[in-house]
Image: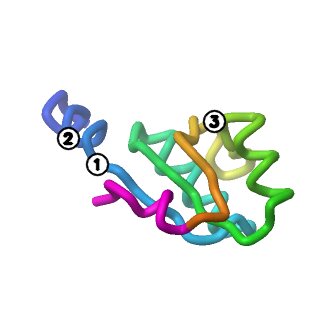
Amino acid sequence: MNNNNMNNTKKTKYAIIGTGNGGQTMAGYLALLGFEVKIYGSSQININIINTQKNIELSDYINGTGKITFASTNIQEVIKEAN
């Protein structure tokens, strides 16, 4: 990835809907790539865990830790400013 792509990556903001396995995997992967990621979920327990840890760790085929910007049960907060 060249420097121009890295600069564009940092400007893109994603809103992920769902804190299940798929949502957390996608959020973690996009964050690992340098995107700003917010995640919405209906489970307050999952939201609390993500906000406490401030990241999602990926392991297996892809290994690394993606920093999550924000997690909430309020979808309006999550999709605000997403591209």
Q: Point out the tag, 3 or 2, that comes first from the N-terminus.
A: 2
**Is residue 67 positioned above or below 43 on the image?**
above
Which residue is at a point 29% across and 48% down the rendered structure image?
12
Residue matched to label 3: 64
Q: Secondary structure at mark 3?
A: strand
Kindly indicate whether the residue at mark 3 contacts the one at mark 1 (C-beta within 8 angstroms): no
> Magenta stretch: residue 8 in it?
no
Q: Nearest to the eye among marks 3 and 2: give it.
A: 2
At label 3, the amino acid type is Gly
Which one is in front, 50 or 57?
50
Lateral position of residue 45 relative to residue 12, left or right = right
**Whole-percent x and y of residue 76?**
47, 66
Which one is in front, 39 or 80?
80
Lateral position of residue 4 relative to residue 28, left or right = left
**Whole-percent x and y of residue 26?**
56, 60
Residue matched to label 2: 8
Residue matched to label 1: 12
Q: Tell me where the magenta segment starts and ends, as one range.
A: 75-83
Q: Nearest to the eye among marks 1 and 3: give it.
A: 1
Kindly indicate whether the residue at mark 2 contacts the one at mark 1 (C-beta within 8 angstroms): yes
Q: Secondary structure at mark 1?
A: loop
Q: Neighbour class for label 2 at 10 Å: few (<14), some, many (≥20)?
A: few
At label 2, the amino acid type is Asn
**Is residue 27 positioned above or below 31 on the image?**
below
Q: Residue furthest left?
A: 4
**Is residue 23 positioned above or below 69 on the image?**
below
Q: CA distance from mark 1 to mark 2?
A: 7 Å
